[in-house]
Image (cartoon, helix red, strand yellow):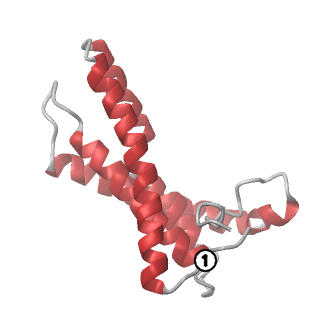
Amino acid sequence: MSEAEAEAVDPDVDLHVAAQRAETAGGAKWAVLAAISVGGAIGACARYGLSLAWPVAAGAFPWTTLGVNVVGCALIGVLMVLVSESGRATHPLVRPFLGVGVLGGFTTFSTYALEVSRLLARQEAGTAMAYAAGTLAGAVGAVWLAASVTRRVAGVRGVAR
């Protein structure tokens, strides 16, 4: 099996499968929702803080959002290997808190989409398309690279699916 085929798949993707929605069954859903909410607030505040620390001038290329999204995706790659592939037991709220909450709040598709729209409105179609494609390539590449490095450093072989 190739490394691409062995990539971890988040087990809560298909909520139509009863076994995959167990972490949100019954009263457990409130703890999961609370963890996601608190994590999301932390991640969004961190992103906002970075936008204040590295503001982008009006009409300039949105480097801060690009950087936030690439770094956030790299951290998601690290997290998923450590939580889903390492074989180590983790608290059931680690992934919802860090993955969905903190890193979901930190990364930003809405700002990315708004910035692409602004570039298009300024008739900078080439820059808009480069930003759109660059963010996609950077994000996917960051997840792959960070997961690969984390597997190597942590001695994780990957998940066979």
Q: Position of residue 76 (x, y in %)?
A: 47, 63
Q: Is residue 3 toward the left or the right of residue 113 in the image?
A: right
- Viewer-proximal residue among 131 and 23: 131
Above or below for 160 versus 64: below
Q: Quadrant of residue 142?
A: bottom left
How many other residues sit within 10 Å of disc 1, few (<14), some (14-19) or many (≥20)?
A: some
Specify whether residue 136 is in view: yes
In the depicted view, which residue is nearer to us: 156 or 93?
156
Q: Amino acid at mark 1?
A: Glu
Q: Residue at x 30, y 13 (%)?
A: 121
- The answer to whether residue 45 of the structure is visible from this angle is no
| Residue ID at (78%, 53%) | 15
Name above or below for residue 88 compared with residue 1: below
The spot of residue 18 in percent (x, y) is 87, 61
Q: Looking at the figure, which quarter contains the N terminus? A: bottom right
| Residue furthest to the front | 1
Query: In percent of the image, x 41 and y 30: which residue is there?
Result: 113
When the figure is inspected, residue 84 is found, relative to residue 35, above or below; the finding is below
Task: Identify the element where label 1 is drawn.
Answer: helix
Residue 12 position, x and y percent, is 71, 60
Q: Which residue is mark 1?
A: 85
In this rendering, would 70 be left or right of 77? left
- Considering every residue shown, the one lying at the far left of the view is 57
Q: Is residue 158 left or right of 160 when viewed as pictured?
A: left
The location of residue 111, given as percent across then percent down, is: 37, 36
Q: Residue at x 32, y 30 (%)?
A: 130
